[in-house]
Amino acid sequence: MKWCRFLAGERVSYGLVDDERVTEVAGSPFEEHAATGTSHPLGRVKLLPPVIPPMLYAAGPNYRGHVEGMARRRGAAPQYPARPEPNFRSVHALIGPEEKIVVPKDCAGAVQPEGQLAVVIGKKARNVSRENALDHVFGYSIGNDISQRDWQRSDRTMFRGKNCDTFKPFGPWIVTDLDPAKFRIIVRHNGAVWEDFSSGDQIWDTATWIQELSRYTTLHPGDVLWMGTQGADGDMVPGDVIEVEISGIGMLRNYVVAEG
Amino acid sequence: MKWCRFLAGERVSYGLVDDERVTEVAGSPFEEHAATGTSHPLGRVKLLPPVIPPMLYAAGPNYRGHVEGMARRRGAAPQYPARPEPNFRSVHALIGPEEKIVVPKDCAGAVQPEGQLAVVIGKKARNVSRENALDHVFGYSIGNDISQRDWQRSDRTMFRGKNCDTFKPFGPWIVTDLDPAKFRIIVRHNGAVWEDFSSGDQIWDTATWIQELSRYTTLHPGDVLWMGTQGADGDMVPGDVIEVEISGIGMLRNYVVAEG
């Protein structure tokens, strides 16, 4: 099933996508819900981030290629993370597909994309085993963890470097019943392929992350975990188009603009 | 006004506290709301965290005493932060007054308290001036930023060190119309005073934090900012009682227990 969240007129609803149509759902996929008799052509609604999570987790360095690429840039030896530890991202920075990534006025350097698999939690998880971890997943979507590298390097926290308004494109929808180890993830910058990698190359896989997180925190329905990226991509400037495509899910396209 | 959030029977509501009674409010203080005709004796309801914020920000090092105390422990020179940059905390770690702080099983060292002023945002804020910043505050409450120092030191992120389930006591209520520079903050461990400091000693004050955050993110109604602590306190073990009192607001008391 393909779940979206959308705006039609002034109403925000969850919906089920099928054959280029969206059927409105009353309620939320994480609670009680029922399909209504109302549907819209997909092209006539505005897709929103498919869920606003209570907590948005980011795996950070979870592919060897990213750790090595970022280290090369700094002229340092790569330091692989010791264990799966997430950071948090701001839910206020989330935007949907086709929306604009706004580069802040006082941002000296460019911003860079990070195409990522997004794992959406469906059931409460606390102290779950690796074997049962994926039973707690609702489905999979696409995230783009926009990063301002100067701020990421200079600042004590990732607040400005990763969490400015519009820095977290997310969507276009959530697809259920897929294997998280078998996604092909492609990042395109103005049509040129910047990254092409497999979710199977993660340092820690989805089940391990859920197991490990659930040792310390309760994962709640609607929580989202972004699983990291492979490469260390180039700069984006206003006017650029950035696309993240994941096999079996779809494509998340956004436009880079300068703050007005 | 003194706003709380509480459980009576099976219903969660916001309420107004007055003379040891809570009047139930329909709706939320951040949206449309109206007092109902129902009230309860304060002692008969269970107080909950006064709001579950969309984003819970933590100022981190915002008092010279804390920076110096933590540096002394590491045997290093104090490093004052260069600018007001928040970290994020997990909203799933929030607990209310009188609740238990659970020390995780695989936690070798003890946990420590950090008594903090909590600033609750009332109005959307984006690019606000320092002069107008406090107009966007709804009110003030109390937070206790429980920290596991071994994990805080060893880990790449603050996930385990600061955000385990129950590590974020918050409450007992939100008080409006106060001056954020004039709070006296007292932390008591089993009745003994561990800290006694003034919110006026912050490195950056509430208005500056709101101004600075709003340059990069939109602050939303219900967002909460914990303003840092002065000291570098001692260890708490199961059986301990920890209280944070702030003049004009009230007292937040919690109990330390071991994970079962």
Image: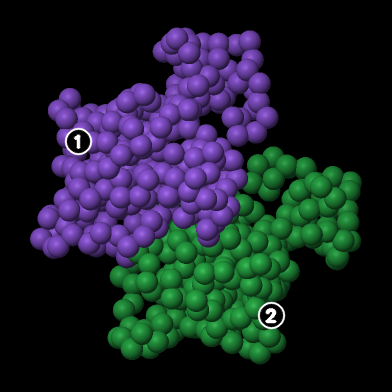
Chain colours: A green, B purple
Chain of the residue displaying label 2 = A
**Picture coordinates of residue A38 (x, y %)?**
89, 48
Residue A193 figure quarter: bottom right
Q: Is residue B25 left or right of A4 when viewed as pictured?
A: left
Q: Residue furthest front?
A: B131
**Picture coordinates of residue A168 (x, y %)?**
58, 64
Quick one: label 2, few (<14), some, or many (20+) residues within 10 Å? few
Q: Amino acid at mark 1?
A: Glu
Q: Is residue B258 left or right of B45 when viewed as pictured?
A: left
Q: Quadrant of the C terminus of chain B?
A: top left
Q: Amino acid at mark 2?
A: Gly
**Picture coordinates of residue B59 (x, y %)?**
37, 50
Q: Which residue is mark 1?
A: B195
Q: Which mark is residue B96?
A: none
Q: Which residue is mark 2?
A: A239
Q: Nearer the viewer, residue B68 or B8?
A: B68
Residue A218 visible from this viewpoint: no
**Picture coordinates of residue A213 (x, y %)?**
41, 56
Q: Is residue A2 left or right of A159 when viewed as pictured?
A: right
Residue A188 figure quarter: bottom right
Chain of the residue displaying label 1 = B
Estimate the spatial distance between the alpha carbons at disc 2 and disc 1, rounded to whole Å: 53 Å
